[in-house]
Image (cartoon, helix red, strand yellow):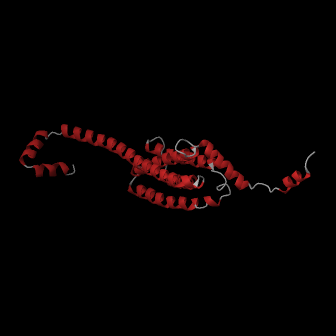
Amino acid sequence: MDNPQDDEATAAAPAADPETSARATTEMQDTHDADLAGFPLWVRLWLGMQSSGIFLDFFLLTLIGYFGDAETTHDLAATTLASSAAGRLLSLSFPYLPAFDLVPMHTFSAILYSLRVGLWLVPILQLCGILHLSYGILLPLWSTWIVVSQLHNSLTDMTVTAHVSDSKRQTVAQMSVTMSYSALFLGLLTASTLVLSVEGGKLGASASASFLSSPGLMHSFGGLMHSPASFMAQVMSPQ
């Protein structure tokens, strides 16, 4: 026979809090997915997406001067600053979302990252000459790309530190900063190396062809031997 007191105890037991249950589930999943360094697997995936996005961002920002004249470059730079601030301000609402405190928003992060890469690809195609966007289309698209990038960065920064244990929080934050600045540096270095190699090759080929085809080649050598200052003034003067 069943004990009536057991039934009364079961009926009197309060229902489990959904938020507490979700946190417990997240902690169990973190423990299950933790790698040898003690970090949950999803933390490394999130930081990897953020770092790759930062690499792509600064690769493209280094090439900002190749989208048009000086006025276009100035407008793109100003749009970058304004859109970065707007993206950071919009991200302040993330902690107030009901789902933020429950579990990491993996789907939302994946959507933001996909938009980030997709919007980045359009200006790259513009640089390659595949697309020919007008100024009225390029500027809003550029602004949207910057806003989405900042939203994704902020969501990653907030989530990876909020959904790990207190003992790992500082280490995860340091890891995030290290990966972000490394990606920033690599993006700048890659784009700068590409620009220098392309422009250097063009300048070298142009200078060699112009120099070798010059009818006054021997005269120039004579001028160099006679007066280096006059020779340099002649070379640097506009044709």
Q: Position of residue 149 (x, y in %)?
A: 52, 52
Of all residues, the one furthest to the left in this rendering is 226
Residue 151 in sight in this render: no
Residue 196 in sight in this render: yes
Q: Position of residue 85 (x, y in %)?
A: 51, 61
- What residue is rendered at 85% in x and 54% in y? 9
- What residue is rendered at 37% in x and 46% in y? 189
**Which quadrant of the figure has residue 35?**
top right
Q: Position of residue 24 (x, y in %)?
A: 68, 51
Q: Position of residue 231 (x, y in %)?
A: 13, 48
- What residue is rendered at 79% in x and 55% in y? 15
Q: What quarter of the picture does the N terminus occupy?
A: top right
Given residues 8 and 122, the one toward you in this image is 8
In the shown orientation, is residue 234 left or right of residue 169? left
In the shown orientation, is residue 12 left or right of residue 130? right
In the shown orientation, is residue 163 left or right of residue 204? right
**Residue 8 in the image: above or below residue 34:** below
Given residues 235 and 122, the one toward you in this image is 122
Count of numbered tags: 0
